[in-house]
Image: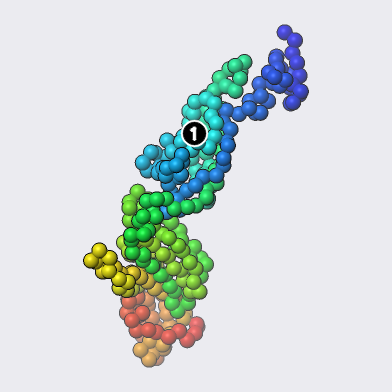
Amino acid sequence: MARVYCPHCGRLVDKLIEGMCEDCYIEKYPLITVKDKTLLKCKYCGAVYLRGKWVRARKTGTEELVKRILAEKATVRGIVEKIDVQEIGNKLHLHVTVEGSPHPLIAERALAYQIEFSYDNDICIDCREMLSKREFALLQVRGTPRGLDDAMKKKIFQIVEQELYKLKDKRIGYISDIKNTENGVDIYTTSAGLARHLAYVIHKHFPSQIVETAKNIGVKDGRRLYHMTYAVIIITYKPGDIIVLKGERKSTISINNKFIVLYSIETKKYEQITIRELLSSKPLLIGNS
C-alpha cells in the first residue's frame, strides 16, 4: 500500500482522514471540548452552581461532582475512565482520561486531557440563610509590644487554613472576611464557636493569652444576642529586650509558649513567670541590650 505524507505534520502515514493523519485528527478534534471555563463557587462552603442548583462535593463525592461539571461545561465524546483533581488558588485543575474515538476510522483508545476552570465566588442559598441567622463573631490576633510581622501573619493564615480544612465537613460556621491591621489580623466569622476554636488553636502555637468579650446586640425570638470578640494577644518580646516590670528593670532571656525567663538588672537574679502574669503586669519596653 502506498504511503502518503500528512500535510499538517509532514509524517509518512498509511492513510489520511479528512486530509490529515490520525494523530493530527485526534489533536484537532479532542474527545473533550470545554464550552465554559468559569465555575460559580460558594466562597464559604465550596458548593458549585450547576444547572440551577448548588452542588457540594461532600454529598456527591469529588469525582461525581467533576463529572457533573464536565456534563454542563463541556462536550465529552467517550467514556470518562479516570479523573485527577487539584485545586490551586482560585482554579480547578483536572487531569481527565477518556476512552473513545473522534472518528469511525480511528480505533478507540484512552486519551488524557488537562483542563482548567476558574472560580467566580458567590454565596449559596444555604450559606446566605446561615449568615442571616447567626451572630457574627470577631477573632483579633495582636502582637505586643511589637506588632505581628509578615512571617507571623503568614504562619497564622496557614494555621487557620489547615484548621478550616480539618473542619470542612462540620457545620461550625465560616470565615466571612480577613483584614490586616497595623499590628495584627482581624478574622470575621459567622459563629462564635468557630472564632473561639480558631483562637485556641492559634494560642497553642504562640506565647499568648486569650481575652473574651461579649457585647449585647439585641434580642431575637426571646433570646439575647451577643457579638463575641476573641482576642489572642501574642508576646513579641525578643531575648535581650529591656523592660520595666513592677518598677524594676529586667532583661528578657528566653520565651516559650508558657513562660518567659527574666534577669533583674538591679538584683542580678533570674526569675520565670507565666505569659499571663507578664501581660497582667503591663510591662514597658524601654530598649534592647
The quarter of the displayed image where residue 197 is located: bottom left
Estimate the x, y position of residue 78 in percent, counting from the top left: 52, 25
Identity of the residue drawn at 38% across and 53% down: 127
Q: Is residue 19 above or below residue 134?
A: above
Q: Is residue 58 above or below residue 190?
A: above
Q: Of all residues shown, which one is farthest toward the top?
A: 1
Q: Is residue 145 above or below residue 66?
A: below
- The front one of 39 and 273 is 39
Q: Of all residues shown, which one is farthest toward the left?
A: 222
User: Is 35 situated left or right of 225 in this image?
Assistant: right
The answer to whether any part of residue 122 appears in the image is yes
Estimate the x, y position of residue 56 in percent, counting from the top left: 40, 44
Amino acid, disc 1: Ala
The answer to whether any part of residue 198 appears in the image is no
The quarter of the displayed image where residue 207 is located: bottom left
* Quarter of the image that includes the N terminus: top right
Identity of the residue drawn at 42% across and 42% down: 53
Identity of the residue drawn at 35% across and 56% down: 130
Q: Which element carries disc 1, helix, strand or loop?
A: helix
Residue identifier under label 1: 71
User: Is 194 situated left or right of 147 in this image?
Assistant: left
